[in-house]
Every structure is written in structure tokens, then in C-alpha cells.
């Protein structure tokens, strides 16, 4: 219960209060439950005071001394707490939402289940602090120092943590969805089961961190350091790990499907049983890495992909350990290199949901007529879950894939412009093989499938597949695609 004498004294002003504290250093003020909202309490001495359940919202406590204070269940929302010393203070379940804690000191403070939504904590210091289950969503923790802090199950969703030092922190089961951690130091931190989906971790240091079953799906890890870390069973699907250093890392059984490892370093990394489906592996270094049991479905290496001294007894060409290579036994010397070499001749084209099929048909016909891209073949046409369409082409390994993609999009755009002119424009010339006035969008789709069928030997290998669902005819596909908004089909492989 609040001491009324202490309450009257503090409302007389900071100078009188601080003078009284000097004269009575052994008295522990009791202001529990007091209403101290919207007061000017700058540089006040509240060391070891009892402020549990007190209302300090909108108050200015900048530069105050609150070390050892009991602030459990206190209300400090929108308070100015910049440069406050909270060392060893108890802020359990306190409400600090929208508070300003720039350069505040919270060494060994307890903030268990505290609320710090959108709090401003730039350059705050909280080594060894207990922040378990704290809500820091959308908070700004740029350049904070939280070495060895307990951040278990903390919500950092959409928080700003750039250049933060969280080395050796305990962050298991923390949520950092969409958080910004560019240049952050997470070295030797425990990140197990944490969620970094869509987080910005560019240039971050995760060296020797423990991130078992951690979710990095869609995260930006460009130029990040993950050297020597433990990432077993982590999810790196669709993550951008280009130029990242993952040397000596344990990546066993990770899901890295559709991830980008362009120019990444995986020297002596353990990738046993990893899923590298549709990974971009341009100039990726796998020197002395372990690849036994890895899934290499539709990988995208190039001539600069380095496979020196890799260890790989067998691999799979399909997910879920399907299509083992070799079918029995183990690889001979150089066999895994040949598997990567065969994958170098593929080019993936991501087509938009509203692809213009007539323009696409013309692109395929145009490609077939270009000597520099021969032999050109269609390997896969797949309608993906997000509505986009994947067109995979195979060509000679020495073909410039980047230039091929540029040429395809250039021809597609030019063709689209001719077929779909602006209202004030007219078609100046017709394409050699397509007359938009002769047939419409549905007929274009029909002609595309007819074209694929007629040119199967020239364009399509025996193993090529057209991915669509329910095994429709080309006319059914055309009808379904014309009414794109109603196309709800599920996809499966069927031969062209």
C-alpha cells in the first residue's frame, strides 16, 4: 500500500525528494499503486523504491535512478525513460508500450512478460536481463547490447534490431517474423526453434550459433556469417543466402528448397539429407562438404559451382527420398560432379499469373529458331500454388543463361505490346506466326499446347512433364485458364 507521506513528498518536486533520499538513505520508499502519471521526474532517485502497480504513464523520468526498483505490473506506457538506470529492477509484467528507453540501462533487470510494443530502445543496455515472453513487436532496438540476455519466447515481430549485439543470448522459440537485424551480432546465441521468417539478416553474424529447427524461410541472409553454426533441421526455404559464409556449419536435414546460395561458401559444411530442391547454386563453394542423401531436384548450378573433394555416397533427384542415384550402391569418383553438370543446362522462367499465352507461344517459336540457343528443350511447365507458372528449359551447358532469360523477356514484352496495344495505338505489323485478329486468348492457349505437341521431338525430352491437375485436355486447360479467377485446380505431373 502506498505511503501517503512519500506520495506527498514526491509531488513537491524532484529536488526536495532527492534531498530527502540523501538524508534517509536506508528508507525504501513505498509508492506502490501511486498515480504518478504525467509528472516531471527527471533525474529522480528512486533506487530500491516500491513502485509496483504504480502509474507512471506519460511521465518524464529521463536520467532517473531506478536500480533495484520494484516496478512489477507498473504502467509506464509512453513514459520518457531515456538513460534511466533500471539495473536489477523488477519490471515483471510491466506495461512499457510506446515508452522511450534510449540508452537505458537494464543490466540483470527482470522484464518477464513485460509489454514493450513499439517501445524505443535504441542503444539500450540489458546484458544478463530476463526478458522471457516479452512483447517487443515493432519496437526499435537498434544498436542495443543484450549479451547473454534471456530472450526466450520473446516477440520481436517487425522489430528494428540492426547492429544489435545479442551475442550468446538465449532466444529459443523467439518470434522475429519480418524483423530487421541487418549487421546484428547473434554469434553463439541459442536460436533453436526461433522464427526468423522474412527477417532481414543481411550482414548479420550468426557464427557458432545454435539454430536447431529454426525457421529462416524467406529470410534475407545475404553476406551473413553462419560459420560453424548448428542448423540441423532448420528451414531455409526461399531464403536468400547469396554470398553468405556457411563453412563448417551443420546443415544436416535442413529444408533449403528454392533458396539462393549464389556465391555462398559451404566449405566443409554438413549437408547430409538436406533438401536443395530448386536451389540457386551459381558459384557456390562445396569444397569438402558432405552431401550424402541430399535432394538435388531441379537444382541450378553453373560452371563456377565448386565441388572439390565433396563426400557423397548417394543423392536423390526428387523430394521425399525419391529417385535415388545411384539406384544401388554408392557413387564412384566424379559421379556427383556429373550430376551437377547435367543440371547446369536448365533455365527457369517464372511467368506471371496473367501470362499472355500467345506471346509465350511466339517466344518458344522464336527460341527454336535461334542457333545460339540450340538444342533448346522444354523440361517442365508447372502451375504453382501461388498462381504463377514455372517454365523450365534445357539447353547446352555453355549457353549464357542470363542472356537467354533477357532475350526471352525482351521478345515476350515486344510481342505482348504488339498483341495488346494501348487504346490509342494500332498494331503496326503482325508477327510472322501469330495473328491476334485471327484468334483470341483461348485459341492462343490451344495453339500453345498444339505447338508443344507438334514440336515434342525438337523441344521436349522424353522425361518432360506438363504440370497441371486432373489430367485435362489442352482444350480444358484453355477454358480453365481463360477464366483465371475461377481456376482452382490442383496440380500433378502428366506427360505432354
Image (cartoon, rainbow, N blue to C red):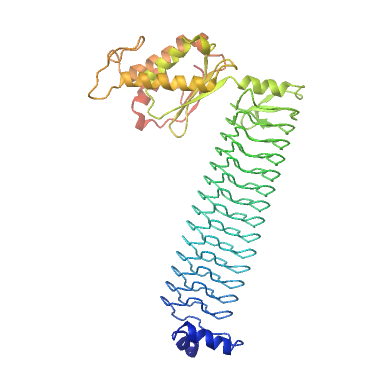
Q: Quadrant of residue 131?
A: bottom right
Q: How many marks are shown on the rendered structure? A: 0
Q: Position of residue 153 (x, y in %)?
A: 58, 58
Foreground: 128 or 376?
Answer: 128
Q: Residue at x 47, y 88 (%)?
A: 9
Q: Quadrant of residue 267?
A: top right
Q: Is residue 128 left or right of residue 475?
A: right
Residue 128 shows in the view: yes
- 337 lies above or below 199: above
* Residue shown at 42% from the left, 12% from the top: 450
Q: Nearer the viewer, residue 97 or 207?
A: 207
- Give the answer, above or below, for where 91 lies relative to 157: below
Residue 36 percent location from the top left of the image: 44, 79
Check the image and name the residue furthest to the left: 424
90 left or right, relative to 423: right
x and y percentages locating residue 97 in the rendered image: 46, 65
Task: Please state if 262 lies on the left or on the right of 230 as rendered.
Answer: left
Instruction: Give me the residue at 47% from left, 84% from top.
Output: 10
Q: Position of residue 26 (x, y in %)?
A: 61, 87
Q: Residue at x 56, y 56 (%)?
A: 143
Q: Is residue 287 left or right of residue 73?
A: right
Does residue 1 show up? Answer: no
Amino acid at each position: 500500500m502506498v505511503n501517503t507521506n512519500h506520495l506527498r513528498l514526491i509531488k513537491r518536486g524532484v529536488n526536495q525528494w532527492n534531498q530527502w533520499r540523501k538524508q534517509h538513505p536506508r528508507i525504501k520508499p513505498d509508492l506502490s499503486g501511486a498515480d504518478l502519471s504525467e509528472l516531471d521526474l527527471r533525474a529522480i532517485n528512486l533506487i530500491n523504491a516500491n513502485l509496483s502497480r504504480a502509474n507512471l504513464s506519460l511521465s518524464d523520468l529521463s536520467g532517473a535512478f531506478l536500480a533495484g526498483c520494484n516496478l512489477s505490473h507498473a504502467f509506464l506506457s509512453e513514459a520518457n525513460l531515456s538513460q534511466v538506470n533500471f539495473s536489477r529492477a523488477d519490471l515483471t509484467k510491466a506495461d512499457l508500450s510506446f515508452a522511450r528507453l534510449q540508452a537505458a540501462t537494464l543490466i540483470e533487470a527482470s522484464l518477464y512478460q513485460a509489454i514493450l510494443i513499439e517501445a524505443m530502445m535504441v542503444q539500450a543496455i540489458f546484458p544478463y536481463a530476463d526478458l522471457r515472453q516479452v512483447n517487443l513487436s515493432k519496437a526499435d532496438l537498434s544498436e542495443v547490447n543484450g549479451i547473454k540476455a534471456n530472450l526466450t519466447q520473446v516477440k520481436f515481430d517487425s522489430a528494428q534490431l540492426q547492429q544489435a549485439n545479442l551475442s550468446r543470448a538465449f532466444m529459443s522459440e523467439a518470434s522475429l517474423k519480418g524483423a530487421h537485424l541487418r549487421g546484428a551480432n547473434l554469434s553463439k546465441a541459442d536460436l533453436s526453434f526461433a522464427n526468423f521468417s522474412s527477417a532481414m539478416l543481411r550482414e548479420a553474424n550468426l557464427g557458432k550459433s545454435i539454430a536447431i529447427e529454426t525457421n529462416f524461410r524467406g529470410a534475407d541472409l545475404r553476406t551473413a556469417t553462419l560459420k560453424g553454426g548448428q542448423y540441423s533441421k532448420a528451414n531455409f526455404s526461399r531464403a536468400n543466402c547469396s554470398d553468405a559464409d556457411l563453412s563448417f556449419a551443420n546443415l544436416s536435414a535442413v529444408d533449403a528448397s528454392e533458396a539462393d546460395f549464389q556465391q555462398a561458401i559451404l566449405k566443409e559444411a554438413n549437408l547430409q539429407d538436406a533438401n536443395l530442391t530448386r536451389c540457386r547454386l551459381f558459384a557456390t563453394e562445396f569444397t569438402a562438404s558432405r552431401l550424402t542423401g541430399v535432394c538435388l531436384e531441379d537444382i541450378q548450378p553453373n560452371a563456377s559451382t565448386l565441388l572439390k573433394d565433396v563426400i557423397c555416397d548417394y543423392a536423390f533427384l526428387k523430394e521425399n527420398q525419391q529417385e535415388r542415384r545411384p539406384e544401388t550402391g554408392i557413387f564412384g569418383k566424379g559421379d556427383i560432379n556429373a550430376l551437377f553438370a547435367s543440371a547446369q543446362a536448365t533455365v527457369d522462367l517464372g511467368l506471371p499469373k496473367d501470362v499472355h499465352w500467345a506471346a509465350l507461344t511466339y517466344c518458344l517459336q522464336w527460341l527454336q529458331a535461334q542457333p545460339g540457343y540450340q538444342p533448346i528443350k522444354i523440361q517442365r511447365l508447372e502451375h504453382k500454388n501461388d498462381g504463377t507458372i514455372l517454365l523450365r528449359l534445357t539447353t547446352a551447358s555453355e549457353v549464357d543463361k542470363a542472356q537467354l532469360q533477357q532475350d526471352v523477356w525482351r521478345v515476350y514484352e515486344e510481342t505482348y505490346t504488339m498483341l495488346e496495344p494501348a487504346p490509342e495505338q494500332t498494331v503496326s505489323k503482325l508477327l510472322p506466326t501469330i495473328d491476334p485478329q485471327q484468334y483470341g486468348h483461348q485459341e492462343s492457349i490451344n495453339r500453345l499446347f498444339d505447338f508443344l505437341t507438334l514440336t515434342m521431338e525438337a523441344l521436349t525430352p522424353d522425361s518432360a512433364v506438363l504440370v497441371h491437375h486432373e489430367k485435362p485436355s489442352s482444350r480444358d486447360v484453355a477454358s480453365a485458364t481463360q477464366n483465371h479467377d475461377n481456376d482452382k485446380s490442383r496440380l500433378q505431373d502428366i506427360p505432354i
